[in-house]
Amino acid sequence: MSVEGRLFDATFKPDWSPEFLTSTMYIGHLTAYRTAIVRKIGGFRSDFDGTQDYDLALRVAQVTNRFIHIPKILYHWVAIPGSTADVLSAKSYAIERQKKAITEFVEKNAKTSFEVMPHYSTGNWRVVYSPPSPPLLSVLSYQVLDVWEISSDFKLIF
């Protein structure tokens, strides 16, 4: 919302999605967390100033999946000149801190190596995972083949 009260850039948000959360801080500023969970994870961390709400959301997501989405407009972010609501690059240090928060979140559960890369616009990210080694292969057959035929087919594939 502009300082004059004009609404713009509406964001329609999905229900809870930990995958989407690794792409962008889509849940916004208006959140409520159980005090015990916030204490358990250590609260806000000064290393993430400028993106502390995103870091907190990612760390909460590591200990619970009990999120509730209220599909109503509950909050308007006022785009004050010089604020990240106006232009995200106003706090460029926050961009690298977002990447660091996402990296820490993904590292906890990643089964392969990965890279956190900028996506289509500032503040949007893409986590690219390396394929497992060796890559998994599933072969489905609707016919009953004997072992020799299957073995021969694999030789043709590889």
Image (spheres, grey):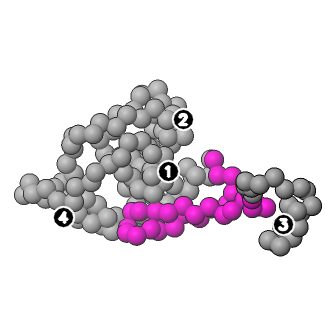
Quadrant in the picture for the C terminus: bottom right
Quarter where residue 2 is shown: bottom left
Q: Residue beneath label 4, please?
A: 81
Which residue is tagged 1? 19
Quick one: label 3, few (<14), some, or many (20+) residues within 10 Å?
few
Q: Position of residue 16 (x, y in %)?
A: 42, 42
The quarter holding residue 130 reads: bottom right
User: What amino acid does circle 3 point to?
Assistant: Phe
Q: Which of marks 4 and 1 is in front?
A: 1
N-term mark: 3 or 4:
4
Q: In which quarter of the image is the N terminus?
A: bottom left
The amino acid marked with disc number 1 is: Glu
Check disc 4: other Cα within 10 Å, few if <14, some if 14-19, many if 20+: few
> Left of 137 or right of it: where is 147?
right
Segment tinted magenta in the rendering: 109-137
Front: mark 3 or 4: 3
